[in-house]
Image: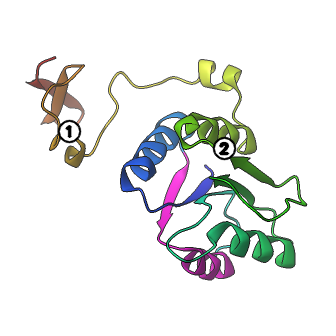
Amino acid sequence: MGQVVILHNNQTLKDLISLNLTTYTGAAIIPRDNATDTIHLLEILPQVDVIICQNKIGSEDSASLLMDYLEKTGVETRLIILGKVEKEIKSSKFSIIEDLSKWEEAIDLTSKYLGITLESLQERVLPNYIPIPIEYFFAIKKCNADVFIRVRKTPEEFQFIKRVKS
C-alpha cells in the first residue's frame, strides 16, 4: 500500500481527494497543514510515495519549499502541485495541475505513480459497500444514493439497514 501526503487549505478538496485515493488505490493518506510539517514528516518517514500539495498556503510558498527539499535530498517522492507555480520545474518527479477543477488528474497521476493501472483496478474485487465517515452527511439535504449502516448480527455476519433513502 502506498503512502500519500495531502497538503491543502481547502478541507473539502482535501477530503474529496483523500476519499477517492483511499477507495481506488488503497493508499494511506497523511494530511498535513503546511510544507514545514511535511518536510519534518519526510525526515522521519522518507518512504512517502506521493505528495499532493497546494502551490501556496497562506504566505508560505509550499510548492517551492517542497521542490527544493526533494531536489536537495534526492528522495524519490513524487510531487503533484495544485495551482500555478512561478518557479521553473527541473525534475520529472514534479507535476503541475493548474486548474483546481481538474482534481481528478491528481487521482490519475497518483495511481500512475503508485503503479496502479486501469487493468489492475478492473481485476480488483471492490466491495459492494464503501465506508464513508458520517461527517460527510451532516451538510446533505438530499442524497443521490441509498445509505446503509452495518450492524453486526454474529461475529461473521452483518446486516445492512437503510438509513437514508435516495
Of circles 1 and 2, the one toward us is 2
Q: Check disc 1 and give the amino acid type.
A: Pro
> Mark 1 — residue?
155
**Measured along the vertical axis of the image, is residue 43 above or below residue 84?**
below
> Mark 2 — residue?
110
Instruction: Judge left or right: residue 118 versus residue 127.
Output: right
Label 1 sits on a secondary structure element that is: loop
Quadrant including the C terminus: top left
Residue occupying image coordinates x 81% and y 69%: 75
Q: Is residue 30 magenta?
A: yes
Mark 1 residue crowding within 10 angstroms, few (<14) / some (14–19) / many (20+): few
Q: Start and end of the magenta stretch?
A: 27-44
Label 2 sits on a secondary structure element that is: helix
**Measured along the vertical axis of the image, is residue 8 above or below residue 130?**
below
Q: CA distance from mark 1 to mark 2?
A: 36 Å
Instruction: Judge left or right: residue 93 versus residue 136.
Output: right
Instruction: Judge left or right: residue 64 versus residue 12.
Output: right
Residue occupying image coordinates x 85% and y 78%: 72
Q: Earlier in the sequence, mark 1 or mark 2?
A: 2
x, y percentage for residue 39?
Answer: 64, 78
Q: Are marks 1 and 2 in contact (CB under 8 Å)?
A: no
Q: Check disc 2 and give the amino acid type.
A: Thr
**Residue positioned most to the front:** 86
Asked where in the image residue 105 lies, by quadrant, the reply is top right
x, y percentage for residue 128?
Answer: 35, 21
